[in-house]
Image (cartoon, helix red, strand yellow):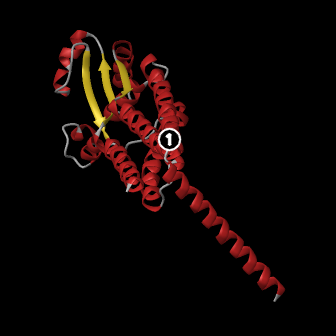
Amino acid sequence: MKKLGFRIGTIILAVLILLSAYFVNFVEVKMETTDELAELFKTLSKDAAEGAAVYEDISIKRAVDIAQGKDDLSPAFNTSSPIYWSPELQVLNSRLITVGVSFAVMILLALFLIVFSICSKNRLVPLIAGAVGIIADIVMIVAFRSAATDVYTGKVDLTAYLLDKFLGTGVITNLLGSIAGSAVKFVFSLCGLQNAFLFLFLAVILWAAINYLVDLGDPKAKAEKEAEKAEKAKKKEAKKAAKAAKAEA
């Protein structure tokens, strides 16, 4: 019964990781500027704050809603011009790929924990999976912050890219870009999802470690483990004997 409880608890934590990945806010986007420009652009966002013309939190769910035209931001992405990845933004490629891969690793770990817990009562594997999840979360945080810093400092000119996308190229666009470049800063930061992942994978580690330690101090569990080892050893010897008999025949 205790082993069943451990497996159910691990599955619940893994499901919470998947739900967090979809519903919890992933990225916070701000467009910092002067107070005057913030007032001018305040109508762009219901969450606009002092010094920020745009202030939005994006989750995977909200990104899906935007793509499906169900969100307030949908019209901004429903343009006739094609979406392309400017050469100026390609310096971010490796870090954004790292963010995506780290995120995918954590999702796969959650799915693995569900399948593994259904098939096995082992405590050590979930503990290792939790540790790998925390490492992946830290890698995602570091890579994202590095890319976001380049955008904020202007090393990657996102303002020019957006003006070019929505207004096209030309003298006026270039003039607006030069003006906006000194007055507008884009701030990208990770939201609650990074902390949700960190907390839940840590919970997986603690849950597995506690159950593992309880088993170490339980004479009955120790006896069961020894019996399992003896049974596996018998099966192994039986297979060897069968192979030897087959070889002789």
x and y, in percent, of residue 64 in the image: 28, 47
In this picture, residue 153 sits left or right of residue 180: right
In this picture, residue 80 sits left or right of residue 87: left
- Find numbered disc 1 in the image and state the secondary structure of the residue it sits on: helix
> Does residue 131 appear in the picture of this structure?
yes
Q: Residue at x 79, y 79 (%)?
A: 244
Q: Residue furthest right?
A: 248
x and y, in percent, of residue 182 in the image: 38, 12
Identify the image quadrant of the C terminus: bottom right
Identify the image quadrant of the N terminus: bottom left
x and y, in percent, of residue 161 in the image: 40, 30
Q: Which quadrant of the figure has residue 188? A: top left
> Does residue 80 appear in the picture of this structure?
no
x and y, in percent, of residue 133 in the image: 48, 40
Q: Which residue is drawn at 36% across and 22% down?
A: 186
Relative height, residue 127 to residue 118 (above, below): above
Q: Residue at x 21, y 10 (%)?
A: 36
Three-letter code, disc 1 = Leu
Relative height, residue 155 to residue 241 (above, below): above
The residue carrying mark 1 is: 213
In the image shown, does 69 or 237 lie closer to the viewer? 237
